[in-house]
Image (cartoon, helix red, strand yellow):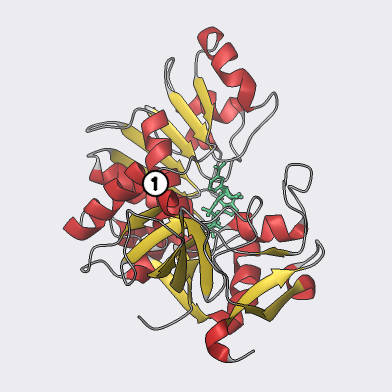
Amino acid sequence: MDDTNTYLAWRYTRFGPVDQVLKLERLARQEPAAGAALVQVHHASINPLDWKLVEGQFRLFMKSKPPCGVGTEFAGVVAALGPGTTGLQVGQRVVGRSIPARQRSSALAEQVVSPVDQLVPLPDTVDSALACTLPVAGVSALQMCRMAHVQRGTRVLVHGAAGGVGHACVLWALQLGAEVSATGSADSQPFLRSLRAQHLIDYRQGTASSWGGPFDAVLDCVARLGRHDLAALLPRGGHAVATLPRVPGVAFDPLLNPLRAIQRHTLMVKSSRADIATLLHALEQGTFVPRVTQRVALADAVQALRASRGGHARGKLVIEVRAP
Ligand SMILES: NC(=O)c1ccc[n+]([C@@H]2O[C@H](COP(=O)([O-])OP(=O)(O)OC[C@H]3O[C@@H](n4cnc5c(N)ncnc54)[C@H](OP(=O)(O)O)[C@@H]3O)[C@@H](O)[C@H]2O)c1
């Protein structure tokens, strides 16, 4: 196989730690089916979901089993379209989200095949390294703010505010006109300051009851806050959104909330072209600019996944697949 008919992709054939099971493989070029596009990836961004899937943390829910690709959000250029496919053109810049649990074509690769209805055109003025952080982390932040009814003047606490989703929550809530308090470790304080949240908190200093408030909304991006913490932070009717499910679980929140003083919600981020387009527009306007703190080459993606697994990422880690 010559290089024009092949591409490099990170793959795993069994579940396990990223540095043991991930291999950079050369695969035969994929041909998109009707309704799909082949995208030459320029940038992809790392999310905790990536290494959780590789480790098999969701193996009971995965529709496809290894061998699988890895990586979820990407930006690049349409290289080919499936037969009769309309809506995009070859050469067009796009941003999108692959669902590695459901499809074998994933973002940490030189090429990805995606349904065209999962791709959003990328304006010429938008940097693809920033755009590739929108489909998961950016959309999560937007949907968390929506679930918590964040608007102008809302007093918001973002817990775990230095991470990919947390920093996007700070930036999106500020963009909406909220008054934002942000928690992070002592090491994260300079980064949080750069986001321009109004109030900064070191979560290791004191309990939640000493973090100020009352708030109208708590966006818990690490799902660490318990019932007593939320009771100390929120008045009756306040909203708490967490990024990970808690007992008794996602399905029960709508049933239990009418009986609760605090309205609890769990994010299950939904693919949304409209939400990506909203974020792209804000990125173009300069009112929402995610922070890429580290860029690594595709060959070094395992290093980035290991850094994410360490649990103290700041902003977004981006994989540079190919110079645009
Ligand atoms: N349900 C969904 O649909 C959905 C969507 C997106 C993400 N998620 C999940 O949400 C979580 C966060 O995602 P992410 O992309 O933001 O992760 P990330 O980029 O790895 O960020 C993690 C952040 O957590 C902070 N942190 C670590 N330990 C903490 C603690 N004990 N208390 C408070 N903060 C702490 C760290 O900040 P410091 O260094 O300052 O401690 C770090 O910046 C992940 O578990 C991810 O899988 C779920």
Q: Is residue 113 left or right of residue 117?
A: right
The residue lying at 39 percent from left, 46 percent from top is: 169
- The one of 246 and 26 positioned closer to us in this rendering: 26
What is the three-letter code of the residue carrying label 1? Answer: Cys
Residue 70 found in image quarter: bottom right
Quick one: which residue is furthest to the front in this view?
Answer: 84
**Residue 239 % position (x, y):** 44, 25
The residue lying at 54 percent from left, 68 percent from top is: 31
Mark 1, residue position: 169
Residue 219 sits above or below residue 200 on the image: above
**Residue 255 % position (x, y):** 58, 12
Residue 217 sits above or below residue 276 on the image: above
Residue 153 found in image quarter: top left
Q: Is residue 311 left or right of residue 210?
A: right
Q: Secondary structure at mark 1?
A: helix
**Residue 1 % position (x, y):** 64, 89
Q: Is residue 15 left or right of residue 267?
A: right
